[in-house]
Amino acid sequence: MSERDPLQALWTRQQQEPFIMTAAQLRQRATRFQSKIRTRNRIEYAAAALVIGVFARMVVIIPEPMVRAGAGLIILGTLYVCWKLHTLAGAPNAAGLDHAASLADFHRAELLRQRKALASVWQWYLAPFVPGMLVFIGAVAFTPELDAPLIARLTLFATTAAPIAAVFGLVAWLNARAVKALDKEIAALDGAG
């Protein structure tokens, strides 16, 4: 162990060069980040429109009241998520970047805002879908028209809910990774200042 101590001491005493980011590099990073946010949000809104369309059709054509209620709750959850996405994680207009008093402060504030939104994704992005999904899956599995024993109904419920829970877990994990990436970007920006 003592053989490593001189190497460790040498490593810890080495001088670090400060990280310097030019104004042009900062503008490029901020512009690219805002573009990524706008693209992400457009994809989310397109997916929301698809979800609303599919479940609205179910509300109209499926006669089972509880299935319709579940579909309606999913639509409401989707609308809530769209509203929260817009208010919490919407990209500012392009003029915001051009008119910022300090480009570094603007970019850092945007990184922090997106980080906060991604860190709370369970609350505003995933949780709103849970009531509708539970009602919908439960109504399908336990509909009176399904002539099956209780164990078959419970199995249908569980095998439908499990992949949805796995997708929710994956979404939460991906967002946690994005939070870590934003933390690194914020630290790099703070180091450049």
Image (spheres, helix red, strand yellow):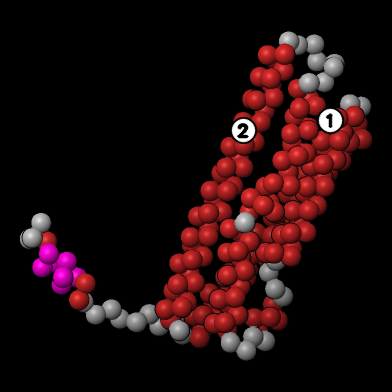
**Callout 1: SS:** helix
**For residue 58, above or below residue 35:** above
Depicted 170 relative to depicted 101: above or below: above
The chief SS type of the magenta part is helix
* Residue situated in front as seen by the camera: 46 or 162: 162
| Residue placed under numbered mark 1 in the picture | 67
Residue type for callout 2: Pro
> Which of these two is toward me, 100 or 3?
3
Alpha carbons under labels 2 and 1: distance apart: 19 Å
Residue assigned mark 2 = 163
Asked if the stretch drawn in magenta spans residue 7, the answer is: yes
The residue under the point 51% across, 84% down is 24
The crowding category of the residue bearing disc 1, from other C-alpha atoms within 10 Å (few below 14, some 14 to 19, many at least 20), is many
Is the residue 62 above or below the residue 86 in the image?
Answer: above
Coordinates of residue 85 in the picture (x, y in percent): 71, 59
- Of the 4 image quadrants, the one containing the C terminus is bottom left
Q: Amino acid at mark 1?
A: Val
**Which of marks 1 and 2 precedes in the sequence?**
1
Q: Residue 173, image x and y in percent?
A: 53, 48
Task: Count the marks.
Answer: 2
Q: Are marks 2 and 1 in contact (CB under 8 Å)?
A: no
Which residue: 61% across, 33% down? 163
Residue 166: numbered disc: none
Residue 188 in view in this figure: yes
Q: Which residues are magenta?
A: 5-11
What crowding class fits label 2: few (fewer than 14 Cα within 10 Å), some (14-19), or many (20 or more)?
few
Q: Secondary structure at mark 2?
A: helix
